[in-house]
């Protein structure tokens, strides 16, 4: 009887640990896809720098293709977790939360980005129609001051996901980090993003918007660190059911 109970306890711990690994691997996969997407978008902008409309169209196709891959990976991870008899219900709830954030909420973000870019195009046409001598300056000012709105919804959703992960897994460090990231984002949105940095890379002048920089850093490096953190920090931790 003692050996049977010992084997059962080991199986429970192993399957709970596996469920935590599945959650971490899902977030890692999304991070890797986001990094690949960002790299391909940069390559597209460089290759088709003379046709912004065509480059934007390819980037939109890429975003939706990536989202489809994320949905497939999520379905596989969810299937793997449901196959575990003793999976942790808390970790499964987190997988649902992150699935909602990284699929339907991401879809809303992608559609909002399309609409935002369309609005920018309309504003550029309006500025040109007014025959103003400072069209470029006025457009850049509007772009800088409004760009944070495009990222705010998705950034907030990711922050909520990190906070929920910290609450459910009882790790306050994630909550503190989330609060700091949100404060930094709002400061950048209110002040820093009003100015841009110009970098000369391959003879291309690039304006860096700080809210965009923070957002993409969170979606790539941030999710990568979170995925590794979940896998490593909770490897040997038993979550009480």
Image: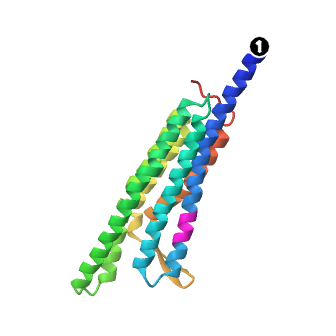
How many numbered circles does the render carry? 1
Q: Quadrant of residue 195?
A: bottom left
Local secondary structure at mark 1: helix
Q: Which residue is mark 1?
A: 2
Q: Which residue appears at 30% of the width and 78% of the height?
A: 124
Q: Residue pushed farthest top? A: 1
Q: Residue pushed farthest right? A: 3
Return the x and y of residue 160 as percentages of the image width and height. 44, 44
Q: Say whether residue 210 is left or right of residue 132.
A: right
In what quadrant of the picture does the N terminus appear? top right
Q: Nearer the viewer, residue 61 or 36?
A: 61
Return the x and y of residue 144 as percentages of the image width and height. 37, 69
Q: Nearer the viewer, residue 51 or 148?
A: 51
Q: Which residues are magenta?
A: 36-41
Q: Which residue appears at 67% of the width and 42% of the height?
A: 232
- Report whether residue 139 is seen: yes
């Amino acid at each position: 009887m003692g050996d049977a109970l010992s084997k059962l306890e080991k199986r429970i711990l192993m399957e709970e640990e596996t469920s935590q690994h599945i959650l971490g691997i899902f977030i890692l996969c999304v991070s890797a896809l986001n990094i690949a997407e960002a790299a391909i978008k940069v390559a597209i902008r460089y290759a088709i720098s003379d046709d912004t409309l065509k480059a934007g169209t390819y980037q939109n196709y890429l975003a939706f293709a990536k989202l489809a891959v994320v949905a497939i990976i999520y379905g596989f991870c969810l299937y793997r977790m449901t196959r575990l008899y003793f999976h942790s219900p808390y970790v499964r709830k987190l997988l649902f939360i992150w699935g909602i954030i990284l699929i339907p909420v991401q879809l809303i973000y992608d559609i909002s980005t399309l609409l935002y870019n369309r609005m920018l195009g309309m504003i550029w046409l309006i500025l040109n129609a007014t025959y103003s001598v400072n069209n470029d300056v006025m457009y850049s000012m509007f772009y800088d001051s409004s760009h944070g709105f495009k990222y705010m919804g998705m950034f907030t959703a990711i922050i909520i996901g990190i906070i929920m992960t910290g609450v459910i897994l009882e790790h306050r460090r994630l909550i503190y980090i989330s609060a700091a990231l949100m404060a930094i984002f709002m400061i950048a949105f209110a002040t820093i993003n009003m100015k841009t940095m110009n970098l000369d890379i391959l003879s291309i002048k690039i304006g860096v918007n700080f809210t965009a920089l923070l957002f993409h850093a969170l979606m790539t490096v941030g999710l990568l660190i979170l995925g590794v953190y979940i896998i490593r920090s909770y490897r040997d931790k038993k979550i009480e059911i």
